[in-house]
C-alpha cells in the first residue's frame, strides 16, 4: 500500500497527509506544525523588517527587483527557523516539500539573498538554485476591511481563508451578508419572503427553546422557508431511536411534534442554519412527503419546481455523503500550516497571515465535490432556487441567479457566474416571463460579450448534458427527477413535453448522443422510448449546429405517463416521423485515417485505410462511403460515422438511417472527429414484426477526410438513395 492509500484508508485529510509526509521524510521538523499552532508567536530580525508595501513592489523585470530582501540564504533561514521564528519555520517546511533532498531541479537566477514577493493572493519566496515555494496570504483571522476603508491596502486584499468551523458565528455572519447583498442588489433573484408554503413544512418555532419541531400542513399559508437538498441514506441503519422519514404510520406523531435530537445529523444541521438565519419553516423531502404513499409522492414530485423555486434559500448539503454525516462538521485544522507574515500599514494590530497549502488539497475531484453532485435528484435542486448555500467539503459557496461567490472571496464583486443558474436568471426577466413564447432568450450579463442569444430549447439541452449521467437509487426516477425543470421550461415555451424532448423542436431534440462518443448503458427497466436520451444511462450531448435546417415532419406521437405527474415517469411512448430514409450496410470493413505531411501543399494529407474488419475508433465506427450503395464520392474520402447507443452495428439485422438535417448547397463538408459526432440523423433498427416500426440505436454523421482540401464548388462525398417514408419509432 502506498502512503496516499494508507492515509486515505484512515480517513486522513489530503492536506494533513501532505504535512505528515514532510515530517516523516524530515523527522527534525515533525513537531513544527504543533509549534506553529500552539507556541507564542515570535519572529527573527529579518522577518520583523518585512513590510506590506515593499513585499508588493516590483522594480524592473527580473527577480532582483521583486518583493523584499530577506535572509542571505536558505541556510540562514533554516537557522532562524530552528531558533523558533514562526514565519521561517513555515517557509522552511514548504521548501522541504517543494525541494526534496533527492531533487536535481536547480535554477540559476543571480539572487544573492532570498526575496519574498506578495503577488495577488499568493506569496512567493525566491532563492538561488530553487523553485519558488508558493503560499497563500490573507488577513484572516484578522480582517480589517472596515477600518481600512478605501485605502489601497484594503483593495490589495482579495482573498480570505476558509473557516475551520462552518457553524461559527463568523460563517453565519458572512451568510447573512450574502443574503442582504443579494436581496438589495440583485433584482432578478426573487426574494420569496412571503410565498405560498409547500403542502407540508417543518415548523421550527420551538426548535431552540424546547428542542421540538413539528410537521404542519400549510393549507394555503404564506411565509418564508428554507429547502434542503441532501443525500439519502445513513450509517445508523434501522436504529429505532432515529426518525428518518415520514410514513403513513408516523404521520400523526410527526404532526404532534418530535425531538430534534432524534433525527439524522443532516436534518439537525439544516435546522441550525434555518434558526441562525431567522427562518421559521424548513422543507425536507424525507419528512414533507409521505414516503410510502405513491399518490402523495407523485403529486409532490410534480410540485418540485415550486418547492425549490419558491424557497427563500436552499441548503445544498454537498459536504455530507449521507444523512448521518452532517454538513456542519468541523474541518481538520491540521490540514494546513498558517502563521503571521507582517503587520498591515495603518492598522498595525492586524496582520497579514500566510498559509500552506494555498488551498485545501483533495484526494480526487469526486472527493472534492461530494456524492450530492453526482445525484440526479439534486440537479434541479441546485438549478431551481434563486439562492443556494452550498456547504461544500472545501468551503461554503453562495450560488444565486446573479452570482457565484466562494467563501475564499473577500468581496461581493469577486465571483463568477454559475452556468447552471443562468436559466433561472433568464426565467426571472420580465421580457420572457409572460408565456407562451418559444423565441430567443438573453444570455447572462456576465457572458454578454461572449455569448449570443440562443433558444430556450438550447438552454434545456445544456441542462440535460449536466443531468443525464447523474446517479439514481431508483432508475425509474430519471424523468421525475428533472420534471420540475421541465415544468419551468414548459411554462415559458408553451410547448408539449415528450419524455425529455419538446414537440416544436423534435428534430434537434433527437440529435443526442453519448458525450465525447463515450459509452452508454441500457437501463434494466423501461424508462423512456428509444428516441429519448432518458432511455440510456450515461452522459449525453446534443451535438448539432445552431444553423442546421431539418427536414422531418412529426406526424403523431403517443405517450402513457404517470397521471399525477405527466412530466414524470413514462410507461410507453412512440413518435411517427415522415422523413428521408435509406439502408446502410454495417458489415463492410470500418476504416481509419492515416495522415502524412504534404510538403508541396504544406499541410497534412489524409489517406482512408481499411481495418479489414469492423472495429471502433474513439467511440465511433467509421465506414467508407465508397463501400456503400448509392453514394457520390469523387475523392474516395467520404466517411459515415456511426455512434451507437449500445452494442455494435453488426448486432443489427437491418440497419436504416433517418436523415434529420439538410445540408445546404455549397456547405463545406465536416472533417472527421473521433471525439464528437455532429449528427446528420439517427440510426434505426427495423422491428422484426413490422417493417414500419423501429427503434433508435444511435446517431450518424457524414464527413470527408479531404475536407480541408476541397475548395470552392468542388463536389464532396455524400450519401444518396434517400426515400421519404413514414416510420413509427418506439
Image (cartoon, helix red, strand yellow):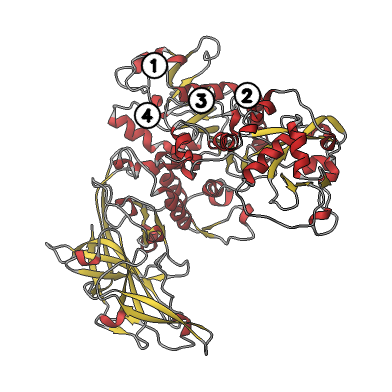
- Residue 120 location in percent, x, y? 74, 47
Spatial separation of the CA atoms under disc 3 and disc 2: 14 Å
Crowd around label 1: few <14 · some 14–19 · many ≥20 (10 Å): many
Residue lying furthest right in this view?
346
Q: Nearer the viewer, mark 4 or mark 3?
A: 4
Q: Observer-nearest residue: 83 or 232?
A: 83
Q: How many numbered tags mark residues here?
A: 4
Circle 2 Cα neighbour tier, 10 Å, few/some/many (<14 / 14–19 / ≥20): few
What residue is at 41 percent from the left and 65 percent from the top? 676
Q: Quadrant of residue 139?
A: top right
Q: Residues within 10 Å of mark 4 (few under 14, many from 20)?
A: some
Residue 420 vs residue 110, the one in the foreground = 110
Sequence-wise, the earlier of marks 2 and 1 is 2
User: Is label 1 in a helix, a strand or a loop?
Assistant: helix
- Real-space CA distance between mark 3 and mark 1, rounded to the nearest whole angstrom: 17 Å
Residue labelled with disc 3: 270
- Give the left or right position of residue 317, taking residue 358 as reference: left
Q: Is residue 384 visible?
A: no
Q: Is residue 178 left or right of residue 51?
A: left
- Residue 168: numbered disc: 2
Amino acid at each position: 500500500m502506498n502512503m496516499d492509500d494508507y492515509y486515505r484508508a484512515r480517513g486522513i485529510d489530503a492536506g494533513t497527509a501532505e504535512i505528515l509526509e514532510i515530517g516523516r521524510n524530515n523527522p527534525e521538523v515533525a513537531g513544527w506544525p504543533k509549534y506553529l499552532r500552539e507556541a507564542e508567536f515570535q519572529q527573527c530580525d529579518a522577518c520583523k523588517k518585512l513590510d506590506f508595501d515593499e513585499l508588493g513592489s516590483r522594480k524592473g523585470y527580473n527577480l532582483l527587483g521583486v518583493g523584499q530582501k530577506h535572509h542571505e540564504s536558505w541556510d540562514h533561514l533554516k537557522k532562524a527557523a530552528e531558533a523558533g521564528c514562526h514565519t521561517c519555520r513555515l517557509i522552511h517546511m514548504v521548501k522541504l516539500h517543494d525541494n526534496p533532498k533527492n531533487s536535481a531541479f536547480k535554477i540559476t537566477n543571480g539572487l544573492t539573498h532570498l526575496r519574498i514577493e506578495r503577488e495577488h493572493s499568493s506569496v512567493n519566496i525566491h532563492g538561488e538554485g530553487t523553485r519558488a515555494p508558493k503560499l497563500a496570504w490573507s488577513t484572516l483571522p484578522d480582517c480589517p476591511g472596515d477600518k481600512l476603508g478605501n485605502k489601497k491596502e484594503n483593495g490589495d486584499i482579495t482573498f480570505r481563508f476558509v473557516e475551520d468551523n462552518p457553524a461559527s458565528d463568523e460563517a453565519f455572519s458572512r451568510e447573512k451578508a450574502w443574503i442582504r447583498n443579494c436581496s438589495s442588489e440583485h433584482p432578478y433573484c426573487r426574494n420569496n419572503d412571503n410565498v405560498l408554503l409547500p403542502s407540508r413544512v417543518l415548523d421550527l418555532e420551538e426548535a431552540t427553546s424546547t428542542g421540538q419541531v413539528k410537521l404542519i400542513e400549510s393549507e394555503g399559508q404564506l411565509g418564508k422557508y428554507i429547502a434542503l437538498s441532501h443525500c439519502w441514506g445513513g450509517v445508523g441503519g434501522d436504529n429505532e431511536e432515529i426518525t428518518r422519514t415520514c410514513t403513513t404510520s408516523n404521520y400523526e406523531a410527526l404532526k404532534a411534534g418530535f425531538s430534534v435530537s432524534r433525527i439524522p445529523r443532516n436534518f439537525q444541521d439544516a435546522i441550525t442554519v434555518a434558526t441562525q438565519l431567522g427562518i421559521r419553516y424548513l422543507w425536507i423531502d424525507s419528512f414533507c412527503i409521505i414516503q410510502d404513499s405513491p399518490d402523495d409522492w407523485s403529486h409532490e414530485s410534480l410540485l418540485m419546481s415550486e418547492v425549490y423555486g419558491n424557497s427563500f434559500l436552499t441548503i445544498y448539503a454537498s459536504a455530507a455523503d449521507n444523512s448521518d454525516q452532517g454538513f456542519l462538521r468541523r474541518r481538520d485544522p491540521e490540514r494546513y500550516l498558517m502563521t503571521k507574515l507582517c503587520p498591515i500599514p495603518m492598522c498595525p494590530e492586524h496582520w497579514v497571515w500566510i498559509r500552506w497549502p494555498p488551498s485545501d488539497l483533495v484526494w480526487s475531484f469526486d472527493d472534492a465535490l461530494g456524492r450530492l453532485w453526482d445525484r440526479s435528484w439534486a440537479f434541479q435542486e441546485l438549478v431551481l432556487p434563486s439562492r443556494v448555500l452550498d456547504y461544500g467539503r472545501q468551503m461554503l459557496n453562495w450560488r444565486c441567479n446573479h452570482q457565484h461567490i466562494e467563501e475564499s472571496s473577500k468581496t461581493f464583486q469577486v465571483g463568477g457566474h454559475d452556468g447552471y443558474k443562468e436559466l433561472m436568471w433568464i426565467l426571472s426577466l420580465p421580457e420572457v416571463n409572460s408565456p407562451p413564447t418559444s423565441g430567443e432568450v438573453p444570455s447572462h450579463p456576465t457572458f454578454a460579450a461572449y455569448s449570443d442569444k440562443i433558444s430556450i430549447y438550447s438552454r434545456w439541452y445544456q441542462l440535460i448534458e449536466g443531468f443525464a449521467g447523474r446517479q439514481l437509487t431508483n432508475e425509474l426516477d430519471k424523468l421525475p427527477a428533472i420534471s420540475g425543470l421541465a415544468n419551468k421550461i414548459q411554462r415559458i415555451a408553451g410547448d408539449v413535453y415528450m419524455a425529455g424532448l419538446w414537440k416544436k423542436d423534435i428534430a434537434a431534440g433527437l440529435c443526442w448522443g453519448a458525450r465525447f462518443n463515450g459509452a452508454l448503458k441500457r437501463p434494466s427497466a423501461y424508462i423512456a422510448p428509444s428516441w429519448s436520451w432518458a432511455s440510456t444511462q450515461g452522459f449525453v450531448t446534443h451535438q448539432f449546429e445552431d444553423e442546421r435546417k431539418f427536414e422531418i415532419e412529426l406526424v403523431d406521437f403517443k405517450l402513457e405517463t404517470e397521471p399525477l405527474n405527466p412530466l414524470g415517469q413514462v410507461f410507453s411512448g412512440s413518435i411517427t416521423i415522415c422523413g428521408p430514409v435509406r439502408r446502410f450496410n454495417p458489415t463492410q470493413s470500418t476504416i481509419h485515417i492515416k495522415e502524412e505531411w504534404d510538403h508541396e501543399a504544406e499541410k497534412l494529407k489524409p489517406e482512408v485505410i481499411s481495418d479489414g474488419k469492423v472495429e471502433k475508433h474513439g467511440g465511433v465506427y467509421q465506414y467508407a462511403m465508397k463501400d456503400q450503395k448509392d453514394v457520390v464520392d469523387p475523392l474516395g474520402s467520404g466517411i459515415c460515422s456511426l455512434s451507437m447507443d449500445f452494442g455494435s452495428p453488426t448486432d443489427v439485422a437491418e440497419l436504416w438511417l433517418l436523415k434529420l438535417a439538410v445540408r445546404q448547397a455549397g456547405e463545406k463538408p465536416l472533417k472527421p472527429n473521433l471525439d464528437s459526432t455532429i449528427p446528420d440523423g439517427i440510426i434505426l433498427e427495423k422491428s422484426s414484426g413490422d417493417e414500419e416500426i423501429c427503434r433508435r440505436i444511435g446517431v450518424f454523421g457524414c464527413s470527408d477526410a479531404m475536407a480541408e482540401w476541397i475548395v470552392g464548388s468542388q463536389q464532396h462525398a455524400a450519401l444518396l438513395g434517400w426515400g421519404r417514408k413514414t416510420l413509427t419509432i418506439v
